[in-house]
Image: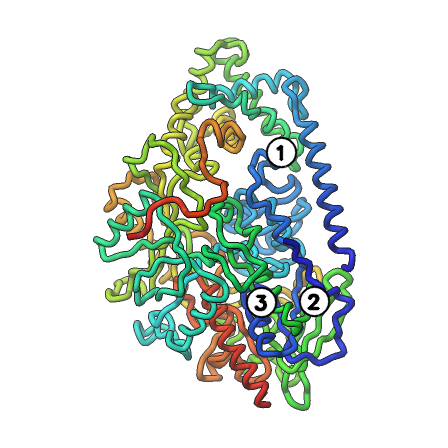
Amino acid sequence: MENGLNRRDLLTLLSAAAFTRLQLTAAEPNNPLFFTAQEFALLDLLTDLIIPTDAHSPGAHDAGVAAYIDRTVAESFRPEEKNSWRAGLASIDELAQHTHGSSFLKAGKQKQVALLTKLAAVEWRPETEPEKFFTQLKQTTAFAYYSSSIGIHQDIDYKGNVILQEFVGYDAT
Amino acid sequence: MLLQFPTANSEVDLDKTYDAVVIGSGAAGGMAAHVLTSHGLKVLLLEAGKNQDTSKILHSMQWPYDHPRRGKMPPDYHALTTNEYNFRQAPYAQNSPYKKVTSYVQGWGGSDYSKTLVVDEKEHPYTGTRYAWVRSRAVGGKTNIWGRLALRLSDYDFKAKTHDGYGQDWPISYADVAPYYDRVDFYLGVSGHPENLPEMPDGKFQRPLKLNYSSLHLRGTLKGMGRMLTPYRAGVATDGLKHNKYRSRCYGRGACNRHVGGCDIHAAFDSPTGLIRPAMDTGNLTMRPNSTVYEVTVDRKTGKASGVSFLDSDTRKSYQAKAKVVVLAASTLESARLMLLSKSSLYPNGIGNSSGHVGHNFCEHVMGPSVAGIMKEQIGKPRTLDDGRPGGFYVPRFRNLKDRQPNFVRGYGFEGGAGCGMVPGTAFTSSGFGEEYKKHVRDYAGATIEMGAFGEVLARYENYVEVDSNVKDAWGVPVLRFNYRFGDNEKKMAADMAVTAREMFEAAKFEIVSVTSDVLPEGWSIHELGTARMGDDPKTSVLNQFQQSHDVKNLFVVDGSSHVSASCQNPTWTIMALCWRSCDYLADQLNRGQI
């Protein structure tokens, strides 16, 4: 107890070091932590189709959404969660093969969008494997994108998390 | 600012008899320490958890992208979900593979920062009926992360039976408590806009919060309906406190809403900086964290409490502390548990329990029904700063004041908010994908408005907790078994909440996005109350109007367990006002040799 402060400071330093290490080892597109290069390319494309670059702001690819998901899945505690991502990506490819006779990556933009449009039509009541995966992927992509620097500052143009001398808004009158 | 409490446990003198030993360091325990030490009494404060400096752990302004998991807990930590409470049997964390299992609150965004402030459910099991029990064992308890809504009760609550015939009146009226609400307001700071409502009296307010455009619009609509929307009455020092060097004024960072709660500059009240640290500066307070009290000890000759037995939470070694007065402030359920555990030949049903009412009349708030909408004029408007304040708005109770509802007694209020947060809710509710989805998220983010209800759960004898001696916690202390369910009145009230929520949003011409009447599991409000209620009759109550045991004159229970009914207004400010009043009485009685 008498060394409580020192011990705590030490722990803070240690965890800061751990932070840095984690950030340094964050996935590079060519070197994902969990997914294969092929899976990662598919994940990156899917997230960027869900939130693309438009005239207003960069999209999911630029915001590193796939890298964030890769890191999260890599360190996830439950094997089922890892499996669900791998199986989900495979189910998208399977659907693409079945519908368009090619992998999703090679299907071309028009067919890719057509396929996602079908899945998105039932996103609030998904039933099949690829439908359920789309819903999971979209919600995760939304969190990863809108909690990224690009999402918060460039897309949403969030004004808060600043020091205010006076509250902003309207007086209750 | 560093908050290093000066006392090491090894230096705590357990040979001496303190004037008072206070169990628990949250809103009630902190207040007891403050008031008793200010009267010159020598106080020993025992807290089961550790001393954690929220100035350093909360990181209120850290951006999500600067955190390796965007604010989420480590992968081997797990927060219980609604479904786990709904479909599994307590103890909910039993056989869990996770390293630490927390209650549901850590499932909210930003929970990594406060994960050490809440208990590990694996170490703290309980049994019985469904209950989402949120516990903090840390210096300051739940005040470290509380929701900050600081409301006064009124005689609609204190004299509720007189008003509608149900239950019991409190042994006090608003006039008895009002001066103590004032003291709490001045000492700790509360923000609010005066509205002159008899059902929710005004306080001694600091600078009020502002409203978003849509909230202001709804305020106007509700006025036309004879209802009220007022800026969130936050237990936050919006103007600062000249007498407290440990707390800053509020700078509108909005962090208290992004994380589970908590404020690393302590503009929002927390017990460690608001109450305990200043009490320590008097030189009259000794605090021993890491002290798990398991029994109130009794002097067989006098029948009075002689102190408490506790375990060092780390070493599990047992100790005794002696005091002239024992003050329980361990929380509504933990104080009841302690009384029931303190059995002796003199008190075979537990100390202070000759009435058999300890653990009974357990009540709280029912939650779940809510409404979300869009203010169409706000769609696609340039971004504004919508969350730079400690809360949104509050719609006070309007049911069963002048009117009589045919289906239920008592009432409910709504907490709400509007506008664009750091991570907008529309990201998760907008349909589709691609450029259209992205534009929709952006355009609608600032146009959202929502509110959810908190309703009074009736105090009923048949809703109770008892000791389950078959199951023990990690310290070998028998746990609580819940026998608690929402009743018919709560269910009918919840149905009405959804109806009026929709009615108000429709009147404001908001586009309704969703309305739900689903009730969340028991315990969700984190407002447990009433397991050792006050009253004039020792046969039907546990405590007198000064929270003093009818049976044991030197035993006081100063937390939410003393409340006779739950009201629908949040309890923390009332807990502290009543505690202040009781501790003034306690000090006076002790000085006169009456205890």
Which residue does the numbered mark 3 point to in the structure image?
A: B30
Q: Which of B433 and A116 is in front in this view?
A: B433
Q: Which amino acid type corresponds to the residue marked 1 in the rendered image? A: Glu
Say what secondary structure mark 1 lies in.
helix
Mark 3 or mark 2: which comes first in sequence?
3
Residue B501 coordinates in the image, percent (x, y): 31, 50
Q: In this view, does B556 lie above or below A143?
A: below
In the rendered image, is residue B572 in sight? yes
Q: Could you tell me how far apart the alpha carbons at marks 1 and 3 are, in whole angstroms?
A: 45 Å
- Residue at left offset 24%, top offset 66%: B402
Q: In this view, does B344 lie above or below A26?
A: below
Query: What's the mark number on residue B199?
Result: none
Query: What's the mark number on residue A80?
Result: 1
Q: Badge 3, how many Cα within 10 Å: few under 14, some, many 20+? A: many
Which residue does the numbered mark 2 point to in the structure image?
A: B288
Q: Based on the displayed image, in which of its 4 quarters is residue A33 positioned?
A: top right
